[in-house]
Amino acid sequence: MAEWLKDAVFYEIYPQSFYDTNGDGIGDFEGIISKLDYIKDLGCNAIWMNPCFDSPFKDAGYDVRDYRKAAERYGSNEDLYRLFDEAHKRGMHVILDLVAGHTSEEHEWFKRSCLDEKNEYSDRYIWTDFWLSSAPGHLWIGGECERNGTYMLNFFKCQPALNYGFHEPKAAWQQGMDDPGPTATREAMTDVMRFWLSHGADGFRVDMADSLVKDDDEKKSSTCETWRRMFSVIRKEFPEAAFVSEWGNPGLAIGSAGFDMDFLLDHAGRGYKTLMRDEEGGKDRSYFKKDAGGDIRRFLTDYLKCLEETEGKGYISLISCNHDTPRAKATLTDEELKLAYAFIFTMPGVPFLYYGDEIGMRYIAGLKTKEGGYTRTGTRTPMQWSEGKNKGFSDADVDMLYLPVDASEGAPSVEKQEKDADSLLNTLKAVLRLRHEHKELRAEGGFEVICDGADSPFVYGREGLILAVNPSSKNLAADTGRVLKEKIFSIGSASAEGGRIVMGAGSFAVYRQA
Ligand code: GLC
Ligand code: CA
């Protein structure tokens, strides 16, 4: 596994909305290059960039038309290579988004696959052999091309599914993983990885990583086998490359498919959701929402299981948010977010910060859908750098901007928060500094629950460090059973005597154990 992951903290960039340097109203590679020092200074030493490849952008670039070509609106391939270089000069790493399960319907492979005449790409996608045939549980499209069959979708209508085969082929048109079609798809996708890794990329975030083999079993055994086969080739060539999956099941993604990291996602019923966005049943019971009646054990039950399943094999990735998820600021205040971030960024594994979360950018409800964003559009608005024109995102006229900038009263900006020692931005910076300075807090450091938060602060151990958090509005005390020595970090008030810790309302603290 890549050594650099041990102390990695990622910053996710939605390139459209990050920083526009040529005044066309949309972010670009040059913009990212010019903000590398900002990202580094924040305490993030790695970047995940959402798809930045040639695309008709019907799903914000998750509909790739050419895997090997940078989208012109962001710059050229050379600009992207320069971004890798500039990041490396600063000791940073950059991973790209690999959309492995589907392409755009405008991809050359798909255009050839649509032809009636059999060719190299006929089996690159999943086709039935008759105009009305299909299989339940999937979406099929007919009537678009000359080929006698219908093709399967992986997500939107613009995203035909690549053919990695069926777990157990049942019809003549269904292929198994070892058939030539799926074998060639795996080779083609491995080649895409090879292309970017050999030009300086440091790895990939893999889109819908669990979606490859169709009608897979519960353990996703064929999809996992598909990843193992691709990794066995590419990892030999690029041993320092890192792979993180959009899967939401670390036990399978890391334990079986062989990813280095897997995201905990905002999925209903999962522990991660109960931290900041628990609105199930109409009542917010999020743990980090003050006095909402949250309970950290709802997170821990799920998390501890994931931790056990991945022990020694890879890292769980806790996220502040991502481009598909409502920003936590939708329901939490900056004071609540400080505690949530202090927790997320002192946990084991490799954490990810979504651009703009460092200043508590709002979720903008009610925006018209943009590039297939729908409700996700409100999480994708331009970064707020300054108090200047378009909040410093772009010089373009307002009506040319990719999405409207949040110009509402009190909208945060980097400029404002940098000047305020107590801001969310500066608090997060301090937390990240703490993480990098203490080996115990990095990816591999141990984790144990000391007090599970029932009528007490939540207290956890990371090797020789004891951490405690109390998001409620009451003082909470706990007997930790440890001897707490020096306090090395705190937000709000916290005191300790012997093994007893008293956490004030809305507080977080880190102690060294005697
Ligand atoms: C993933 C991406 C999402 C995209 C979808 C289809 O969930 O995160 O943004 O729309 O896959 O590629
Ligand atoms: Ca631009």
Image: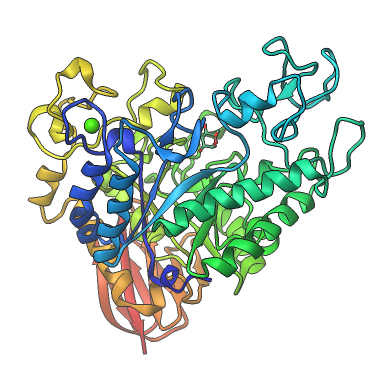
Displayed-image quarter of ligand 2: top left
Please say which color scheme the image uses. rainbow
- Residue 23, image x, y percentages: 16, 28
- Compared with 227, 395 (above or below) is above
Is 491 or 242 nearer to us in this picture? 242
When the figure is inspected, residue 192 is found, relative to residue 92, above or below; the finding is above
Screen quadrant of the C terminus: bottom left
Q: Is residue 278 left or right of residue 164?
A: left
Q: Taking 50 as reference, is 130 left or right?
A: right
Which residue lies at the image location 78% right of the left edge and 51% below the top edge? 222
- The spot of residue 357 in percent (x, y) is 30, 44
Query: What residue lies at 47% left-to-right and 82% top-to-bottom?
Result: 481
Splitting the image into 4 quarters, where does residue 427 fall? bottom left
Q: Is residue 454 visible?
A: no
Q: Position of residue 156 (x, y in %)?
A: 59, 23
Q: Residue at x 42, y 22 (%)?
A: 371
Q: Nearer the viewer, residue 10 or 478?
A: 10
